[in-house]
Image: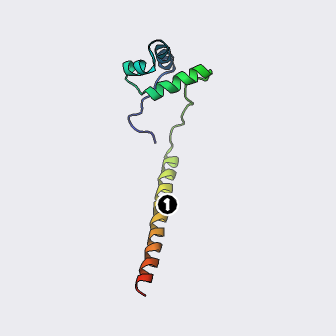
Amino acid sequence: MYPPNRRSYTDEFKAQAVALAETVGRTEAARQLEMSVKTLDNWVDASRKGLPLSSPERQPVTKESSELARLRAENAELKMEREILKKAAVFFAKESR
């Protein structure tokens, strides 16, 4: 999932930000707009390359996909714990000899 403080910008705002960056510079424009210079750099670069400034539409997260992601993370953690326990068992078996 995305961080809760993730900002979203309209296409109109992006176009205006690129225009401002072209006139006053990227760093100054980013400071005036209170945004990341890197984000503004990405928009300016996309504009110069003729790429669209809008990002592709994101699909809403369904309950099933959320649950699947949670279970996959839990499964990976359990596998890692199992591997650690196997290595510990081998280590202590060698120590007891």
Say which quadrant the C terminus sits in.
Answer: bottom left
Residue at 51 percent across and 43 percent down: it is 62
Q: Amino acid at mark 1?
A: Asn
Place residue 48 in its image quadrant. Answer: top right
Count all numbered tags in the image, as a single digit: 1
The residue where tag 1 is placed is 75
Work out whether 29 lies above or below 58. Answer: above
- How packed mark 1 is, by other alpha carbons closer than 10 Å (few <14, some 14-19, many 20 or more), is few
Q: Position of residue 13 (x, y in %)?
A: 47, 18
Q: Nearer the viewer, residue 86 or 7?
A: 86
Residue at 40 percent across and 85 percent down: it is 96
Side (left or right) of 74 relative to 47: left
Residue at 47 percent across and 11 percent down: it is 23
Q: Position of residue 82 (x, y in %)?
A: 47, 69
| Element type at mark 1 | helix
Q: Position of residue 56 (x, y in %)?
A: 57, 30
Q: Nearer the viewer, residue 31 or 78?
A: 31
Side (left or right) of 43 relative to 49: left
Q: Nearer the viewer, residue 54 or 69?
A: 54
Side (left or right) of 22 relative to 31: right
